Image (cartoon, rainbow, N blue to C red):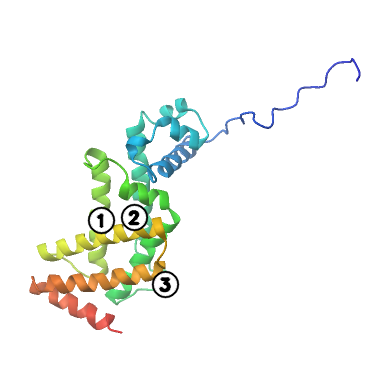
Amino acid sequence: MSSGASPPEAPPSGGARPARRRLSVDRRREELVAAALELFGGRDAEDVSIDDVASVAGTSRALVYHYFGGKQELYVAALRSAADQLEARLRPSEAGGPVDRPVERLGMGLRRYFDFVEERAAGFAALVRGGPANRSGEVGEIVDGVRHRLLGLVMRLLRVEEAGPVLRVTLRSWIASVETAALDWLERRDVDRRVVERMLVDQMVATLGVAARHDPRVVPLLENLVSEHAP
């Protein structure tokens, strides 16, 4: 080899740490929230650390603290992001023309819901499973707010203007069943998704049948659904 001057040093390769990408403030926050959702969707919030989030996002813990004051703030931001995404997905669309039959509207709502479950699995799991058993403060407001808006959406799909106590309990119980069924499907996927959606429509008809025995005001709604839903 020649004893002359060495060539310029080549850029580091292999195991060397890559240079941090320059991202806008909003884009960096979105990246950190996405990393947090991935973690919160699979583990209890108490078991996720800022270091875990930094590792998944490929950045430093100092940068995570720069954008979020701590894990609780990041957790709330992640859940709020998932809630916003779900509500945007469920927002009624007239792209395919209006649908007049309540059963069809309910089926379309379930398809949009399961589209979100399938495409945003981590966000859905974090929203349904994440956090302490006693949800309070901002976390409770986010989770309860989503369920309250889901109740309003189901009422609109069924063309119900006002729900009495029996119907309200029935619809809220059905929404809880939808969450449980979606989470089970996401974890196991041993039942075809369309079958699960049809089962949930059948379950709505069945639970309204129970409600109608306790409140005659539910009978017209049940009769309307049964007439449409008959094979």
Q: Residue at x 42, y 72 (%)?
A: 96
Number of numbered callouts drawn? 3
Q: Amino acid at mark 1?
A: Arg
- Closer to the camera: disc 3 or disc 2? 2
Asked if residue 188 lies left or right of residue 130, the reply is right
Residue 47 at what x, y percent from top left? 36, 36
Q: Amino acid at mark 3?
A: Gly
Closer-to-camera residue (119/196): 196
Closer-to-camera residue (221/121): 121
Q: Earlier in the sequence, mark 1 or mark 3?
A: 3
- Quickly name the residue at label 2: 87
Q: Which element carries disc 2, helix, strand or loop?
A: helix
- Quickly name the residue at label 3: 96
Residue 142 at what x, y percent from top left? 27, 45
Q: Earlier in the sequence, mark 3 or mark 2?
A: 2
Q: Earlier in the sequence, mark 1 or mark 2?
A: 2
- Quickly name the residue at label 1: 149
